[in-house]
Image (cartoon, coloured by chain):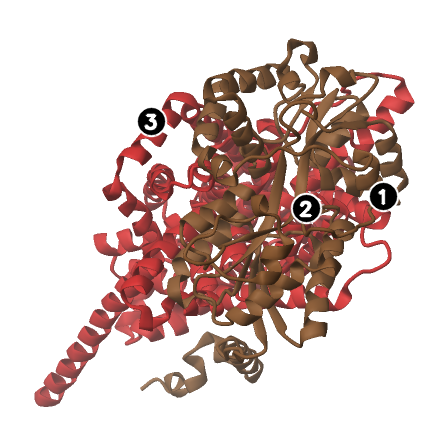
Chain colours: A red, B brown
Amino acid sequence: MTAYNRKLSTQLCVALWVFMFSRRLFLFLISLCLAIPILSILGAWLQWDALSFQILNEMSQTVLPDYVLTSLILCVLVAFGVISMGCISALAVTLFDFPGRKFLEWALLLPLAMPAYVVAYAYTDFFQYSGSLQQWIRLSTNLDGAVLPDIRNVWGAAFVLSVCLYPYVYLLTRTALSERAVHLMEAARLLGADLWRRIFSLALPLARPAITAGTALALMETLADFGVSNYFGVQTFTAGIYKAWLVMDNRIAASELAGFLLLFVFIVLTMEQRAQSRIRFGNANLSSPNTETQPLPLDFAQGIFCFFVCALPVFLGFVLPVVIMIQYFVSNGFSNHVPWSRFFHWTFHSLRLGVITALIAVAIALFLAFAQRLAPHRYTKWAIQISSLGYAVPGVVIVVGLLLPVAWLQNIWPQSQIGFLLTATIAGLIWAYLVRFVAVSLQSIQSGYARIPTTLDDSSSMLGVSGLRLITRVHVPLLSRSLSAAVLLVLVDVMKELPATLMLRPFNTDTLAVMAYQFARDERLGEASLPSLALVVAGLLPVILLSRSLRHK
Amino acid sequence: MNTHSLDPLMLNPFLRTKRHFLVFSVLLSLLGAHLNLQAQEKTLNIYSARHYPTDESLYSDFTKSTGIQINRVDADDAGILARLKAEGSASAADVILLVDAARLWRGEIDGLFQPIQSKVLEAAIPPQLRAKPSDGGISWFGLSTRARVVVYNPSKAKKEDVDTYEKLADPVNKGKLCVRSGSHPYNLSLFGSMTEHLGPAKTEIWLKGLVSNMARSPKGGDTDQIKGVASGECGTALTNTYYLARLMRSESVDDKALVAKISVVFPNQSTTGTHVNVAGGAVARYAKNKNNAVLFLEYLASPAAQNHFANGNNEWPVSKGVKFDNPALQAMTGGTFRSEVLPISAVGMNQIKVQQMLDRVGFR
């Protein structure tokens, strides 16, 4: 009996050791792959030379302070925009019952399907001095000059980014609220707490990790944005990186600037995780959601008010831009020759890249989050931190960071053909996508994990379920909402991604985003409207699936 | 023992059902299909920065007449150069098409092109529109040109106040000028050539004058500036000719109304000549299909392809003796115009200097 036990425990120890070791190794390899582009950017600090110093010195005396200030203002405005729109709508649809709630519940996700640069194109031409709206107002009112404020400034950029990015906050907040808040709110109501108290001291604090995670995503997107700010002539820090690299042709100066951006993001991420670690909520009630209590019914006036408050972001972030694009398409698009066959190719390539990346990204993120949960070691934390950085890095910077080491390797080892493998296949592109978007799936899965009490893991391991089986048998079913959200968020993000797709894709694989950009670059907004609209339609499918999966689980 | 753990399909959430398995295997095969490399013979691999959808027929005509299949990646100039540098000797590119003189120069300096010898190209393309001979060949050839011109609204600005680049900085045009971002390649090349003509000190004063004359801070593309002039927001603006020609040839009622409100002037006709930028092509340093690549460049210099540049994208052909028929280009110039003559390397070398001047004078 004892011999048998000893044998069993030895086997168990060996198995555990192999698993732990391979997991460490695997963790190391994954985070290394994701970190290579970022490390090569940081490595530029070691190559400091006179020319790059001169360029940076010039920039810091002329334009750099402005860039930093503009970026900060943009971040503050976008944070305000996404938190207010995302939280209010999430609270409204989970806590109250009003006409159109079921519809708005998923419609609020629609702006996710809109690339911010497409929204920027649409709004600009519509609102600008020479645009249709202003001309109509001038004609009908006999006014002269500018009758509407110009949208192409930092306020406009913040507006466009907010209406495109608030769904991140909405989605994560709603998931967090609908999983628990309704029950607790019911309890609080029975205990006599009034509505505002229930919202401010129960619902919002409960949703805080989700709100922070969503806002962090939106801000990282904001920092990485080039399309909107470039089109609006808003000079952000990213614009400075682009200038140093593309105009000055000095990748060292560009990488050094990118290093500053990374440092900033790193600080934000660390702060966010500090904040989250203090408020890690376990879910006491894991029973089936069938017992869901009904949201609070509202009277007619309140209901209508709620409807309009929730419908406004959808209108601004989706309906209006789409209507403008359709109007473009009808009035001066491909009037007589819509290239349907090529068009289906573009769609196919977009979807294919999105699906492949999304599955890999979620697998990696699940593994990383699991590793951190099991052994919240300092090393694991760093690995995750570095893997998350990529999201805030402009796509072009990632491409540079990825191409530099590849060029070096290709140069010293030409037979490897690594340069060819990277760009003649989709390998390089998927790599770049993963560097950028693993953070998206990671955020979603981590905020899911935060709601599963760790005591559950202990119980499981006492029952003999650990390692891979703990993931597949216990965590995955509990995380199913977060996982499907992660898959779909990455899918949509990849389809909208531009700089890496533009530079790294193999021959003859134009995507919808690439074509929309090519037409817009050639200043043919009419033609650009077809791939843009298709991008929206293709993005709709995952968004609808996303909302369905959230509802029916 | 837990019986559930024996269910192998539970091990992977993505393989839990047959349908999922099917989806998964389809994805894997899609990934695999990409690794099948293309046959090497009758093919030509192009990296192109030409972002003009009208070019489709240019490529398909070449395939029709030669049987050579074209594989293409379109990106922007800087992206193509960065990609080529990373791919090094493994690069699949045979032909590189770029749309800015400074970038062509950059590619040549960085050794991304290979000098070629072609009697056809040397006979067709004038010497000032191609690279200087080196290593027994010429590393790139200009294939079409576009001028950077001034449009103005006759009710807001007078022709004699905007007929040189220098006058755009004159206080008489205060609050009238519209221009896209100074860091855009088209502007950088123009400002680079001004630096060559005026010297850096005067150019910086000139740029400062442009900034203080602006009707609004730089934003949008060239078409936006033309629209601004037509609507009266701006009195005058800088634009590339093909954007203007496209509007002039448009069938749309709005565009016709817009064109009716503006006039165009080719600046510096009595002095240095109007600034002209060049779009061109080169054979990649590590081209695997070099013969096809040369054949393609020669095709682009042929009258048929040159005519396509003129009619499809409203650019000026560069091949000697090519006749073209483009009503908009004719109407703009009244036949011919004087274009500036400058070594392209000079414009390329001024880029950093120009960007730093822009930063100093606050030209966005």
The x, y position of residue B325, in whole percent, is 83, 49
Above or below for A23 versus B210: below
- Of badges 2 and 1, nearer the viewer stands 1
**x and y percentages locating residue B161 in the rendered image:** 73, 15
Label 1 is placed on what type of residue? Answer: Pro
What amino acid does circle 2 point to?
A: Asp
Disc 3: host chain: A
Q: Earlier in the sequence, mark 2 or mark 3?
A: 3
Q: Which residue is mark 1?
A: B327
Label 3, residues with CA under 10 Å away: few <14, some 14-19, many ≥20 = few
Mark 1 closeness class: few <14, some 14–19, many ≥20 residues within 10 Å: some
Would you call the spot at circle 2 few (<14 residues within 10 Å), some (14-19), or many (20 or more)? some
Q: Which residue is mark 3?
A: A57
Quadrant that contains the N terminus of chain A: bottom left
Question: Who is closer to the viewer here, B85 or A243?
Answer: B85
Q: Secondary structure at mark 1?
A: helix
Q: Which residue is mark 2?
A: A522
Q: Marks 2 and 3: same chain?
A: yes
Instruction: Look at the picture and state if A345 lies above or below A13.
Output: above
Relative placement, left or right, of B64 versus A192 is right
Residue A196 placement: quadrant: top right
Residue A151 is situated, as x and y percent measured from the top left of the image, at 67, 29
Residue found at x 25% / y 60%:
A375
